[in-house]
Amino acid sequence: MRTDYAIGIHDLSFSTTSLVLSHAELSRHNGTDLAKYHVGIGQRAMSVPTLDEDIVTMAAAAAAPVVERHGTDRVRTLVLATETAVDQSKAAGIYVHSLLGFHPNVRVVEVKQACYGATAGLQFATALVHRDPGQQVLVIASDVSRYDLDSPGEATQGAAATALLVSANPALVEIDRPSGLFTSDVMDFWRPNYRSTALVNGKESIAAYLEAVDGAWRDYSAQGGLPLKDFRAFCYHQPYTRMAFKAHRQLLETCGEAPDDAAVEHAVAATTGYNETVGNSYTASMYLALAALLEGEDDLTGESVGLFSYGSGRVAEFFAGHVRPGYREHLRGDAHRAAVDRRRPVDYPAYRELREQTLPTDGRWHDLPHQTQGPFRLAGIRDHQRVYEAA
Ligand code: CAA
């Protein structure tokens, strides 16, 4: 079912960090067979932040080109989704609002539910635009994923931000109704407030994700959603890219179809290009998959794309996007490829040294070294306050 008038993603831009650690380098350090990384989990590299990069600098860098193209006049809501917040009280989006020169008449809020947060933001945004189609909502997803050094999760780390401008008559993708929803209380992956790295029950987290694919699809069908055959491709949350292939096999089984390798490849392969080199960007990950799909070679005009958003803990949502005529003219493929390609490679010792540096907590003034090559930076910590600047 479609809305009375189209509402959806008008612009999509992403950013990542200045540094990259390859899985070849990681496997040299820990002796893991490289094929486990390249084939087993489908990862080739991970984005690594410099000391002066964080979710705010990535979020502002992702949103800046959107603001440059569309201005800020119609944006009255800015939602920033993250599970790696920099403050327990203040919304990170307020720093972005300031760095990008938004006018004051904007509501800014942060949302969290593991890797699902941005999809909640997107759905809230469609409701706001439905209420007043003259308004636009900027939804930003920004995360830095960190696991303990030398743990199995370390190979799935990454970092990125996506900025989605949500509006009526969108240029890229209409967000269709209904949604299939699935929530239940499990401890598959979590991060207590006193930890900077996530805790995870690895194998259970995969099972929890696959159960959620089944549950969300069943609800989607019960709500009157499209049949499987109407979808051209599927963007799944990608904690590592092989997970998308597992997820689609699960969906075929749920639908009573044979989990045929060629069908899985056709549905998913074009969505993994960015995530396999950026790593897990948590709540941004599914939207990097969407960027890769739209910027790929196939013309998707008029096609339906399945979107499966998963947040550990756990909340999942399946919904459809309908690709708009003329979408190709509005894509940012060159800028996205440049952002990925210009990252500076680091060796394992340099990565480890960065991981071991923590920001000071003593309340004194600390200026940070200028390391980022991005447009915004965390300049320092002063009186327990983060100070950002244009780089
Ligand atoms: N060549 C080719 N393939 C190989 C191989 C080799 N030499 N060695 C191993 N493999 C394969 C394995 O067969 C396995 O494939 P299957 O999954 O198809 O069985 C795959 O590589 C991974 O191998 P292991 O299971 O032995 O790997 P591991 O013990 O290191 O754990 C992991 C993998 C559980 C994903 C771990 O990286 C982890 O804990 N990651 C973080 C949690 C996570 O990403 N969970 C996903 C669902 S939760 C979620 O989606 C939310 C979120 O963002 C975190």
Image (cartoon, rainbow, N blue to C red):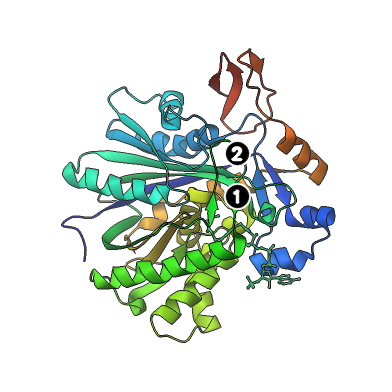
Mark 1–mark 2 Cα distance, whole angstroms, equals: 9 Å
10 Å neighbourhood of mark 2: few (<14), some, or many (≥20)? few
Q: Residue drawn 83% across and 52% down?
A: 29
- Dot 1: what SS? strand
User: Image height check: is 284 above or below 195?
Assistant: below
The quadrant of the image that shows the N terminus is bottom left
| Residue 86: image location, x then y, percent | 52, 31
Front-most of residues 59 and 242: 242
Q: Is residue 304 visible?
A: no
Q: Which residue is under mark 1?
A: 199
Answer with left or right where residue 37 lies relative to residue 28.
left
Q: Which mark is residue 195?
A: 2
The x and y percentages for residue 161 are 51, 43
Residue drawn where x is 38% and y is 66% of the image: 305
Do the residues bearing badges 1 and 2 touch, measured as CB atoms within 8 Å?
A: yes
Considering only vertical position in the picture, is 38 above or below 311? below
> Which quadrant of the figure contains the C terminus?
top right
Q: Does 217 appear above or below 59?
A: below
* Secondary structure beneath label 2: loop
Q: Is residue 59 above or below residue 187?
A: above
Residue type at the position of mark 2: Arg
Closer to the camera in the image, 14 or 258: 258
